[in-house]
Amino acid sequence: MEISNRSASPTWAEIQQQPETWLTTLALMANHPATANIRALRRDAILSGAGSSAYAAGAVAAAWPGARQIPTTDVLTEAERLPQARMMLSLARSGNSPESIGAIERIRRFQPSIEHFAITCNADGRLAQEPGMTAIVLDPRTNDRGLAMTSSFTNMVLAGLCVSHGDELGAALPALCRKVSQRAAELSERAEKLAQTLPRRVVVLAPPLLLPCAREAALKILELTAGKIAVLAETFLGLRHGPMSFLDADTVILAFVSSNQQTRCYEEDVLAELRAKKLGKLVGILPEGCHPAMVDEAIPAVAGALPDFLRTPFEIVYAQLLAYHLSLRAGLDPDHPSPAGVISRVVQGFTIYPD
């Protein structure tokens, strides 16, 4: 995925490497002995993570009917109220965040028979080493060194999607990887051009099955600009119920448009309403069949032929590039975008309180 010579930046390299690592993840999941066990339990599962890992869990849950996405931060404090499940699947980049182990210990108290699995990018992390844990450890390259999760996010989502839709992804992934690599320069140039406006606000819209993707996109912009840009993630229809008040004429609206034709009818109505009200600059990630005139800037979706619940790992790439360029435009270092140390790669100073 050659874009430009920014090899000194881990975050840039980690965005670039994604198509290659996706193929590695596909092969790993096809041959890992835990895949079949997770598949058998997936309809009665809790999927958990914190921050970007929580959104990754949500993206996987969208493809697993019956599964429930519950952040580790909620498991930690509300374990006794959680529904009974046969499996807990924990997702984590490093596996060293205090909540990861704390949540497992808490749920074991109230659901001692639950089986524990993990998808993580760090073989040496506490999560992968946890007794009684069956861990799937991804390619070590996905253990992103940059503060913000990029290739770790997409590969953890892809690993989970391979559990339920491995054949479909196996057929589609080689072409998708080529497409993302071939379009990398174009996507970066368009993201950089948009970033030059340095908007004060960004709204990310998505259909329900892509809402975890929208939330991750919003978080990337928030993290990489150190909060200098206010962001909001919402469904198209949810925007009408109060959150539209966030918008003004200068807001950038990044819209992940659905690949489902019926769902898209509702989305087109919302976009038309925004245009009529002169709210925001509309940037649409559009599957084939969408009319480019529905937005101010049309960006062809890279995975628009897939159902929405499989698109997150691929469509998020443009948003990652946008966040990267917004970080530079804001005068920040995308690898270390929090100069005051407000956030860190692994959550620090977190106390786990005993019962």
Image: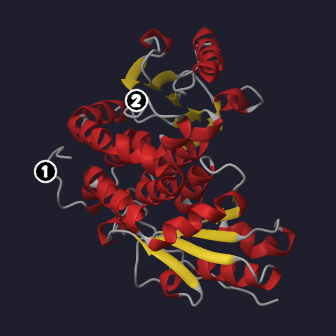
Q: Is residue 12 left or right of residue 55?
A: left
Please tell me how many numbered marks the rendered image carries: 2
Q: Nearer the viewer, residue 259 or 246?
A: 259
Do tag 2 and tag 1 residues touch (Cβ < 8 Å)? no
Q: Residue at x 37, y 39 (%)?
A: 318
**Residue, disc 1:** 5
**Which one is closest to the eye, mark 2 or mark 1?**
2
Q: Position of residue 190 (x, y in %)?
A: 30, 30
Cα–Cα gap, marks 2 and 1? 25 Å
Q: Earlier in the sequence, mark 2 or mark 1?
A: 1
Name the colouring of the figure. secondary structure
Quarter of the image that includes the C terminus: bottom right
**Residue, disc 2:** 301
Looking at the rendered structure, the secondary structure element under dot 1 is loop
Q: Is residue 186 left or right of residue 211?
A: left
Res 333 visible: no
- Characterize the local packing of mark 2: few (<14), some (14-19) or many (20 or more) Cα atoms within 10 angstroms: many
| Identity, as a three-letter code, of the amino acid under mark 2 | Ala
Looking at the rendered structure, the secondary structure element under dot 2 is loop
Point out which mark residue 262 bears. none
Res 220 visible: yes
Q: Residue at x 61, y 33 (%)?
A: 207
Q: Position of residue 350 (x, y in %)?
A: 62, 81
Q: Determine the image quadrant of residue 110.
A: bottom right
Q: Determine the image quadrant of residue 153.
A: bottom left
Is 6 situated above or below 353? above
Which residue is farthest left? Answer: 5
Q: Nearer the viewer, residue 255 or 19?
A: 19
Q: Position of residue 268 (x, y in %)?
A: 59, 15
